[in-house]
Amino acid sequence: MDNSSTRRPGELTKTGRRVLWASLTAAILVTAACSTGTTSDSASGEGISAPSTLPPFVSSADEGQPTSLPRSIGFPQSTTNEYDNDIAAGLRAGAADTGMELQAAVSDGDPQRHTQITDQFRTSGVGSIVTSVLDPAAQEPGLLAAIEQGMAVQTVVMGPSTSTANAPQYEIGKALALAARDFIETSLNGKATVAILNIDSVESVRPRYQAIRDVLGDIPGANIVGDVEPATQDSQAGYETTATLLQKDPQIDVVLGEDYFGVGALAAMQASGRDLSKVFIGGTNASNEPRDNIAKGTAYRAVVSTSPAIMAYSMARHAADWVDGKAIPQGMCIVPLVLDSPAAVTAFENDMNDLKGTYENPERLSKYLTFLGSISYETRDQWFTDTWTPTTCSDQ
């Protein structure tokens, strides 16, 4: 029996990963060997600075003429962590549904290797490049060259680009903190001892932690006894940091941070012998293990999803539209979605296991993404020279 239809986005067997890697590597080498290169496209112009607000995107089926760009997407994948694997899964599904080819290769977080992969895709010829932020200074020249060649450059949280996906970071933190506030008021009699496990060293997401501090600062009975950045961004660091904080203050009953920190925090709370019915752990990004914990009714009570699979699926659909000469959004605003119950987790996973149905149903899609602005191959001189950063996904 084939269980691929029920496997979560980004989950592959070890054999599947080896086959996928071998296939994609072969595709890249064959395409590069047959390439004669691409020329620059002066119609791309000098671009514009990303505006603070964008109008709603309105699609037009009869807009533009098909381009001569290849029906292919290049994806230099930064890592094989769950988030990046979900992006790969979404791109793969979207490419399959639109007759596009997906070429992908993993850079393992090496900026030089990432740049080389991007340049290989660009010179071999693709219609779109999709990439997330790794080292913006190293990535910029290759992305500028791709824009100059007329490709759709779709990025996550960085510029330059023809289209950027980004989330209102302050709203992400606020949504998580409000979920914690509700628990504090209803289950802890308005009083809580709080630990924040931040990643303030990552400038782009720093606003989410400021939002957490702002919301908690308005709760008279909330006392923040720890606001620290763990040594590494993984669950083990979350465990070690929480365990250390519990030694200093065993009464900590609220822990907020990235979702992988929360996994470690839950383990530390369990090891401490705390009454977990009076503990709230919350995180951002909504990867598999935190969702599982919420579905089981553990002290891991809420995550704020940034929905990478449907984001990437949309990018693949937009890549096909670009090649076909149609307009695509300039900005893809990622809606902060709170998952705080088994029912919410189930609804989310059902949508992620039906990416095509979710994308093609405006009501379902609006839970995850808002499309803003408009750009096409014909209007490609309106590409963004810097990072588009939304403050909200509504009332633009």
Image (spheres, helix red, strand yellow):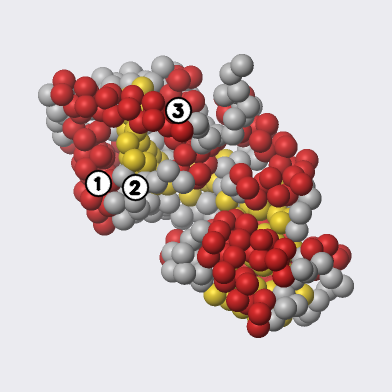
Circle 1/circle 2 CB separation < 8 Å: yes
Residue type indicated by callout 2:
Asp
| Residue under numbered circle 3 | 16
Q: Is residue 372 above or below residue 71?
A: below
In terms of depth relative to the viewer, which is nearer, 395 or 309?
A: 309
Query: Hey, which residue is sitting farthest left in the picture?
Result: 36
| Location of residue 263 in the rendering, given as x and y in whole percent from the top left corner | 62, 57
Q: Give me the residue at 70% from left, 66% from top.
A: 271
| Residue under numbered circle 2 | 108
Can residue 394 be seen here?
Answer: no
Quadrant housing residue 189: bottom right
SS under mark 2: loop
Residue type indicated by callout 3:
Gly
Mark 1 Cα-neighbour bin, 10 Å: few <14, some 14–19, many ≥20: some
**Which tag, 1 or 3, sits closer to the chain's start?**
3
| Label 3 – label 2 distance at C-alpha | 18 Å
Taking the image as shown, residue 341 lies to the left or right of residue 162, namely: right
Can residue 166 be seen here?
Answer: yes
